[in-house]
Image: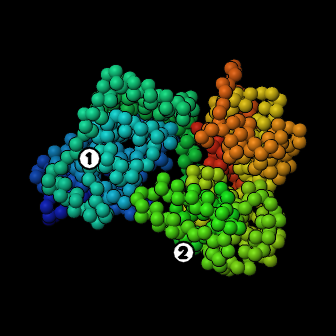
Amino acid sequence: MPQPQMPAMTNWRFEADFEGIGWLTIDTPNSPVNTLSRLAIDELGAALQRVEDLVASGELIGLVIQSGKDSGFIAGADVSEFDSMSDPAVLPEALKRTHAAMDRIEKMKAPVIAAIHGFCLGGGLELALACHYRIAVNDDKTRVGFPEVNLGIFPGFGGTGRSIRQAGPVPAMQAMLTGRMIKAGAARGMGLVDKLVRHRDMLHWEARKAVLQKRSSTPAPLIERIMAWGPIRSRVVEKMRAETSRKARKEHYPAPHALIDLFERHGDNWRTMVDAEAGSFVPLMASDTARNLRRVFFLSESLKKQGLRGKEKPEFKRVHVIGAGVMGGDIAAWCAYRGMAVTLQDLDMARIQPALDRAKSLFKKRLKGRTEVASALARLEADPAGNGIARADVIIEAVVENLEIKQKIFTDVETKAKPDAIIASNTSSIELERIASALKDPSRLIGLHFFNPVASLPLVEVIRSGFNVERDVAMGASFALAIGKSPVLVKSAPGFLVNRVLMPYMLGAVERVERGESPELIDAAAVAFGMPMGPIELMDTVGLDVGQSVAHELKHSVPEDSRFARLVREKKLGRKTGEGFYKWADGKAQKGEAPAHADLSGLGRELVKPLIDTTELVVSEGIVASPDLADIGVILGTGFAPFLGGPMNARKEGKA
């Protein structure tokens, strides 16, 4: 049939088939993912106005909105526009136009179907929820969710009310408050998706059937909706506030608290909640927290550019890990989880088996179905004899922080490894040059410093010694990216970046405890400042023996008559032994009440000052290439208050 004329569009393509079904395809130019920029929203509004005319004239019987990219549907709004959009003089009108486009979809006199594969996040999910029916591919690449809270805001394109309409108040609010990624099956169970298909090539035909059958989505059942009624909503709100406050202080992260306030006022009427969104959304967008979280987002994204790309991009299939302790075993498990064949070496099976048991627990938690778990376990092989060294693309040593032991290992590895294999140490504090000096070719050794717990913490410090060239560390960064980690390139120096800045902070807090100050008060003050965990609890979590070893390596004194040294001698090493500065039970520190303090956050600033001072020193010494890299490295490696944008940024803004 002749193609209906559409306004000129940059982000969208439109075609109509012989059955009168319109296919509106988003394909953001010069981008690997689709995003909803202001231009894309304006073009969508104009296209929908034309579709309305075609429906009214009988030329179209329905519309399918789909993606032209392999990466997925729509990854959300265009974050690069957020700084300019945060202007209160600009944002309300932009939101008004976006809401008008979503309402236009919802009020269309013909069925509008969302065909989803891959990522459907933020504004992309809000657009899909405005459609009458949603179909998604049921594979591991499909993820839906509202990550806005990670940028200091909440859904602002109508997603608050529409998600409550479809999923019910409690599941929808949990999704928005946590920002979690939701798999296709779970999204179907929640009501965010109506139909699942097995393969992407089935989307077209299922969407066609949905149009022809005039399918429409069913709202959440009554038993879900009553949670937003009257006194029940008050109890739900109270519980939400308590849970949210434990994870995110209102003065640090106002967005989730503002969302709960919005739900408290309007949660019993999804349409009213949609209409009231902008009143809370606009001030959040302009907040310091949102601005700094956007900074963290862009810094995180920049790390993805540090590896080799294009034709130079390497492929990693086999990994060999030497050392099956907590760190080495968990590195091996993570690589197997990410799809690589892994051999794990230690002195005997008695040392390797606990690592295999932990790996099985990880796979059961992260993977769906017995087949996937079994496949991951099959990829992880015990290798006491070290036979995997000769076949490995990457060899990682993760044994105790002992220079002689590490040198002996690498002297052996060098004779067996493939010429192009990456040879890396997971050393946490020893200068790389000292380890590499035992090799015939010291330029082969780089550092890949992971952080515990490996499965949760994204940072890998990729360490460059004086023997390395740029390509050596670029290969290391490529490997970190291949296993889903965030690489920060640092020069070899005692403690590198993260341990170098952490140790003065932790030891300063320990010295206060030695002088009789309350560990509970010190930890509470650090958390009040914005740290995820206090320094005394952190020392217990890391392990007092590890802390003492790193302190010695960094030339910090630990007096023999100190409580710290005595606890190490008595093997009271913290969480792993059940007692350190605190006693531990079921993985939690058993703390008493913190004494009252007039200025808790002020005390927190005092505690964190050595960390910030040392970060400045590390930058001045060229250990990291820029203040920006220092900020993102310290945030990812220590949990330093993301709402402050990093230690260097916090000092620049006078907030630390």
Does the rendering let one see residue 163? yes
Does the rendering let one see residue 10? no
- In the rendered structure, which amino acid carries the disc numbered 1? Cys
Quarter occupied by the C terminus: top right
Marked residue nearer the N-terminal end (2 or 1)? 1
Q: Is residue 342 left or right of residue 650?
A: left
Snapshot quadrant of residue 220:
top left
Whether 577 is drawn above or below 341: the answer is: above
Residue 111 location in percent, x, y?
Answer: 18, 49
Q: Is residue 484 left or right of residue 461?
A: left
Which coloring applies here? rainbow
For mark 2, what is the residue?
311
Snapshot quadrant of residue 197:
bottom left
For mark 1, what is the residue?
131
> Under tag 2, what secondary structure?
helix
Cα distance in 3D space between marks 2 and 1:
40 Å
Residue 418 location in percent, x, y?
Answer: 66, 79
Q: Residue at x 66, y 38 (%)?
A: 584
